Image (cartoon, helix red, strand yellow):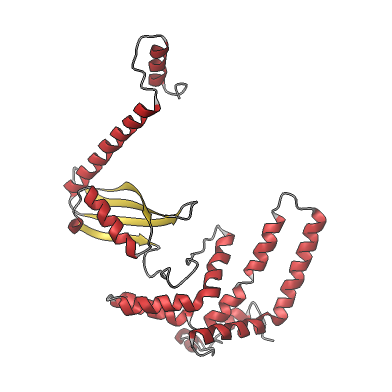
């Protein structure tokens, strides 16, 4: 590091020249210095938060490589000194052993440690913490899909393809337990959509992405040979062509089984917007797969 820092370079030169007995180059003293600096930085942040009085919290939960949920805590304020400025202070990571329910306990404990009064909190923002199916319902966490990540689209479809009934049960539980009318209406609409025959057919059809992803992974192998790759692509093409002929009928059968599990009617129903336009209830899907 001394190659890029003239101050540290001069210090090391003095130590090597015998001009100083206290080098501060050991790991124990370095960690102690880092802790002292950290405490001072946190103290300055907390002081400014208290001076601003009102604040909001931003919580974002993301699993790490060990699949533990890491909850990042950010406090947002409007600095009062001089020209008003919006500032955000990162207060560290917390291990969230429970999603949604455990967030409040963790943030309240953290604020208490910082001696920040929660009564002055005027806003809360959560990611993956609102209307999420609980672990007692689903085996795999629901995932959103990203435009830049092809695999995320398959993962997001897979969860609702095989856990639609559990997701619906979780939504119905949220509807029954919440006192917020807006949340109640939203989860009711989601539960009705997840429990519909139309939605079940779509999830079964779109799970064809798994076949495409499997081929994609194989072709990315470093030991893949050209002749093998050509054979894999031909088989994938044959499978997709066959799916166009029989896939929709198979999807209907699978979707009916899902509806039976949820005890809902396996019938296609038009939405209000489609009734106004006079379109078929499955017209978007029919552009992809023809009716047999």
Percent from the top left, x then y, of residue 144?
Answer: 48, 64
Instruction: Tell me the quarter of the image containing the C terminus.
Output: bottom right
Which residue is at a point 29% across and 61% down the rendered structure image?
Answer: 104
Residue 197 appears in the picture as rendered: no
Which residue is at a point 72% across and 81% down the rendered structure image?
Answer: 245
Q: Is residue 202 above or below residue 57?
A: below
Percent from the top left, x then y, of residue 249?
Answer: 66, 84
Name the residue nearer the viewer: 241 or 32.
32
Instruction: Tell me the quarter of the image containing the N terminus.
Output: top left
Name the residue nearer the viewer: 118 or 65.
65
Q: Is residue 273 above or below residue 106?
A: below
Residue placed farthest to the right in the image?
Answer: 227
Percent from the top left, x then y, of residue 105?
Answer: 28, 59
Number of numbered discs visible in the structure rendering? 0
Q: Is residue 137 above or below residue 49?
A: below
Percent from the top left, x then y, of residue 12?
Answer: 41, 16
Residue 194 appears in the picture as rendered: yes
Which residue is at a point 25% across and 56% down the rendered structure image?
Answer: 108
Q: Is residue 3 left or right of residue 72?
A: right
Q: Name the quadrant containing residue 24.
A: top left
């Amino acid at each position: 590091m001394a190659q890029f820092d003239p101050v540290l370079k001069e210090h090391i030169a003095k130590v090597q020249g015998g001009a100083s007995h206290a080098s501060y180059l050991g790991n124990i003293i370095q960690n102690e210095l880092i802790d002292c600096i950290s405490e001072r930085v946190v103290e300055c942040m907390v002081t400014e938060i208290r001076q601003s009085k009102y604040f909001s919290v931003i919580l974002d939960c993301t699993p790490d490589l060990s699949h533990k949920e890491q909850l990042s805590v950010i406090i947002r304020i409007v600095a009062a000194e001089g020209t008003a400025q919006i500032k955000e202070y990162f207060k560290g990571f917390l291990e969230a052993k429970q999603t949604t329910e455990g967030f409040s306990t963790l943030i309240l404990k953290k604020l208490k440690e910082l001696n920040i009064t929660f009564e002055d909190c005027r806003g809360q923002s959560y990611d993956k913490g609102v209307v999420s199916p609980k672990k007692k319902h689903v085996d795999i966490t629901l995932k959103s899909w990203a435009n830049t990540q092809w695999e995320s689209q398959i993962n997001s479809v897979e969860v609702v393809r095989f856990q639609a009934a559990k997701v619906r049960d979780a939504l119905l539980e949220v509807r029954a337990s919440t006192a917020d009318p807006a949340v109640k209406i939203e989860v009711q609409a989601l539960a009705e959509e997840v429990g519909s025959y139309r939605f079940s057919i779509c999830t079964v059809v779109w799970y064809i992405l798994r076949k495409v992803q499997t081929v994609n992974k194989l072709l990315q192998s470093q030991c893949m040979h050209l002749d093998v790759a050509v054979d894999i692509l031909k088989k994938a093409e044959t499978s997709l062509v066959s799916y166009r002929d029989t896939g929709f009928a198979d999807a209907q059968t699978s979707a009916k089984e899902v509806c039976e599990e949820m005890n809902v009617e396996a019938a296609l129903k038009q939405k209000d917007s489609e009734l106004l336009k006079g379109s078929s209830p499955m017209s978007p899907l029919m552009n992809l797969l023809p009716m047999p």
